[in-house]
């Protein structure tokens, strides 16, 4: 479903991703963990074409985006095709404040896919019910809790019928009591077979829900393992140091 090969990205003279390679199968739920600043979020943004890579290859849902070292030609058209199949949910929700929850979810299918208002409304209604927000469709984001806004953001991403969902620390801005309601939506999507990649600091969720876990440090993938093995017997000392509180 998704393949990354020798992905490199720098900001100025500072390398952020140092030749990352990864393969994810259809239906997998993958948690990406690691210290802040290790490149997790940058990798996620590259996978969605929101950040341009310096070099490497990304293949997602049959769309291939490749950049050779030193290549200057843009990849905007390929990135646009990539985003049709790869949805993304951000840390800060990013709902339009001047639109209701229903209007937020309806907008992208109407603008990008050209579906009718009635069809978009039916899609939005179904998805908002899926994430437990059917009673809040006419509310504006300011009247919703953080957890409700984040579930609305998930519904908005799902409205484009993506085959892969990316989440960039989707619960880090939430009060602890609201975290589970967002994570439960991801578990339900996993049960339905959605391919998901989650950058998270929620180690309990990573251990309980992931098919496997990717540990990154300093722009590199250090270790990939299933949830039990990486917590019970990490192979790399850097992984052990990071997870020392959880082992």
Image: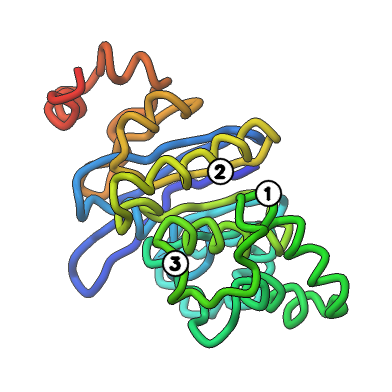
- Residue wearing tag 2: 185
Badge 1 density bin: few <14, some 14–19, many ≥20, Cα 10 Å: some
Taking 210 as reference, is 65 above or below it?
below
The residue shown at (39%, 32%) is 205
Q: Report, in whole angstroms, how far the alpha carbon at label 3 lies from the one at label 1.
A: 18 Å
Left or right: 160 in relation to 142: right
Of mark 3 and mark 1, the one earlier in the sequence is: 3
Of mark 3 and mark 2, the one earlier in the sequence is: 3
Quadrant location, the C terminus: top left
Badge 3 density bin: few <14, some 14–19, many ≥20, Cα 10 Å: many
The residue shown at (49%, 44%) is 197
Taking 98 as reference, is 177 above or below it?
above
- Residue wearing tag 1: 130
Percent position of residue 232, x then y: 27, 12
- Residue wearing tag 3: 93
Are circles 1 and 2 on residues that touch, CB within 8 Å?
yes
Percent position of residue 168, x then y: 40, 55
Taking 27 as reference, is 99 above or below it?
below
Of mark 1 and mark 2, the one earlier in the sequence is: 1
């Amino acid at each position: 479903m998704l393949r990354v090969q020798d992905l490199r990205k720098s900001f100025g003279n500072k390398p952020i991703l140092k030749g990352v390679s990864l393969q994810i199968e259809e239906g997998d739920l993958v948690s990406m963990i690691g210290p802040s600043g290790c490149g997790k979020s940058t990798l996620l943004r590259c996978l969605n074409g929101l950040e341009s890579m310096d070099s490497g290859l990304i293949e997602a849902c049959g769309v291939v985006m490749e950049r050779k070292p030193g290549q200057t030609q843009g990849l905007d058209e390929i990135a646009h095709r990539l985003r049709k199949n790869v949805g993304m949910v951000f840390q800060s929700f990013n709902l339009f404040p001047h639109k209701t929850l229903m209007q937020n979810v309806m907008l992208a299918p109407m603008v990008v896919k050209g579906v009718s208002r009635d069809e978009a409304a039916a899609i939005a209604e179904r998805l908002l019910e899926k994430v437990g927000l059917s009673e809040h469709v006419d509310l504006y984001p300011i009247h919703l809790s953080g957890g409700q806004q984040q579930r609305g953001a998930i519904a908005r991403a799902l409205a484009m019928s993506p085959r892969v969902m990316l989440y960039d620390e989707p619960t880090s801005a939430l009060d602890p009591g609201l975290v589970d309601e967002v994570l439960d939506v991801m578990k339900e999507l996993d049960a339905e077979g959605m391919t998901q990649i989650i950058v998270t600091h929620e180690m309990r969720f990573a251990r309980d829900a992931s098919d496997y876990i990717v540990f990154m440090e300093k722009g590199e993938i250090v270790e990939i393992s299933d949830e039990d093995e990486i917590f019970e017997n990490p192979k790399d000392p850097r992984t052990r140091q990071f997870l020392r509180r959880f082992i």
